[in-house]
Amino acid sequence: MDKHKISAMSEEKRTALLTAAMAEFAQNGYKKTSTDTIISRAGMSKGLLFYYFGTKKDLYIYLYEYANRVVMKEYNEKIDYESKDIFARLRSMILLKFKLIEAFPAVLDFISSAYFEKDSAVVEAISQDSKKLYQEASGKLLEGIDLSLFKPGIDHKIAIQIILFTIKGYSEAQASSEKKTKDYSSQINHYIYEIDEYITALKAAFYREDRV
Amino acid sequence: MDKHKISAMSEEKRTALLTAAMAEFAQNGYKKTSTDTIISRAGMSKGLLFYYFGTKKDLYIYLYEYANRVVMKEYNEKIDYESKDIFARLRSMILLKFKLIEAFPAVLDFISSAYFEKDSAVVEAISQDSKKLYQEASGKLLEGIDLSLFKPGIDHKIAIQIILFTIKGYSEAQASSEKKTKDYSSQINHYIYEIDEYITALKAAFYREDRV
DNA sequence: ACCCTGTTGACTGGTCTGGTCAACGAAAGG
DNA sequence: CCTTTCGTTGACCAGACCAGTCAACAGGGT
């Protein structure tokens, strides 16, 4: 039996499957994720998964390429590297992250889990460019930022770490308290408001007074 | 067959078993952890595990009580709540954490994983006091701290969150880059040095100049 | 009537798991 | 030196679980 065109699936079923599969793989890794769990979560029959995707491995690789394509596309379109202000850059990354989670809830979790995937059945298929996105993102974030905005006498390395830890800490705290509210999009405004509170406080702490 | 006295085990074997089991349970949760993995990691035979512990569930519960006992003991002995300075309190908690990890590498990971354990075979046995330690620790940490040490005009809630996020972020970054160096104890001094750098920077950012 | 496409879930062979047990080596005690 | 006891082993078992298959079928198009 050949592999069938995945694009021929109905939109609903495809996204249900992809979303369920990404969430499961992200949570349990390749080996420990069962196709039974995926299909029951996606609400479809077992045969259909294999009808379209062939094998579990094929599904994983498809997901990996899909996730990278989606994230790369958004990333290249939306991130603004014009500004040399680290807060402006971070803010635009966070906004992007919210958009991505809204559209593809598990895509970021899946990508970062793939980064640590160590099952031999699957590593060679993803290892080539596995680290590209991550390294590009974290490398570029700090490239060429304007350190003269900081108060004199401040240890830039430490200050930047504190800024990054704060953003990461808030993101995680916010993600783990996920309520099942339908309108994530309405909550986003609240999250952005809180993020701005942190940014204001961090600017007051580390930026020269005339640049806050 | 009755359960045998665990304390009759040789010290070496017991700690090898407990350490291996805590690490595995912490990583995979109750259900997905296999006794085969535990024994091979601990370097002993399968029969022995069941000879001493009876069942997998009994092992888990024993571990849970053991871990709580160990942590509670250190916690009650060593944490200093005299000081009203949040940095002094945090610092003493971090030092305690280092000590605990040195003595029982996986004990903290295990406890926090038990906090999220949801397998029905085991939840009722741990749910009663599962949250005690965690809530006590995070509640007491902020109880009665001296807010007058902060710069006037600072949003205390935000500032404290930034402080906590920073400490947590550094701890995690440090834990995930664990090298297999034998002498963790010699690295601890380095970690403390870095933590103090962060504390200095955070004090400069948020405390009144006359209190830094 | 006959295909074709999409869909189902019972089924299979193989692997993995918690738990058992007959056997064994060494030490203890007589 | 024999026997009992204790700690220890790993092959083994019955059941669960798993990726992948397949016969059957629904329904639309021709």
Image (cartoon, coloured by chain):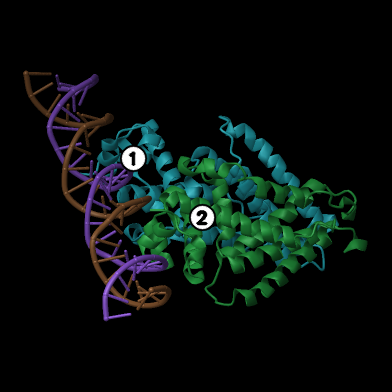
Chain colours: A cyan, B green, C brown, D purple
Report the residue marked by disc 1: A36
Is A163 or B38 nearer to us in this picture? B38
How far separated are the C-alphas under marks 1 and 2? Answer: 25 Å
Q: Secondary structure at mark 1?
A: helix
Q: Secondary structure at mark 2?
A: helix
Residue type at mark 1 is Asp
* Label 1: how many Cα within 10 Å (few below 14, some 14–19, many 20+): few
Q: Is residue B82 left or right of residue A89?
A: right
Asked whether residue A86 appears in the rendered view, the answer is no
Report the residue marked by disc 2: B26
Residue appearing at x 61%, y 40% in the figure: A177
* Label 2: how many Cα within 10 Å (few below 14, some 14–19, many 20+): many
Q: Position of residue A182 (x, y in %)?
A: 56, 29
Give the number of the disc on residue A158: none
Quadrant, the C terminus of chain B: bottom right
Residue appearing at x 53%, y 60% in the figure: A136
Q: Position of residue D9 (x, y in %)?
A: 32, 68
Up/down of B187 relative to B69, above or below? below
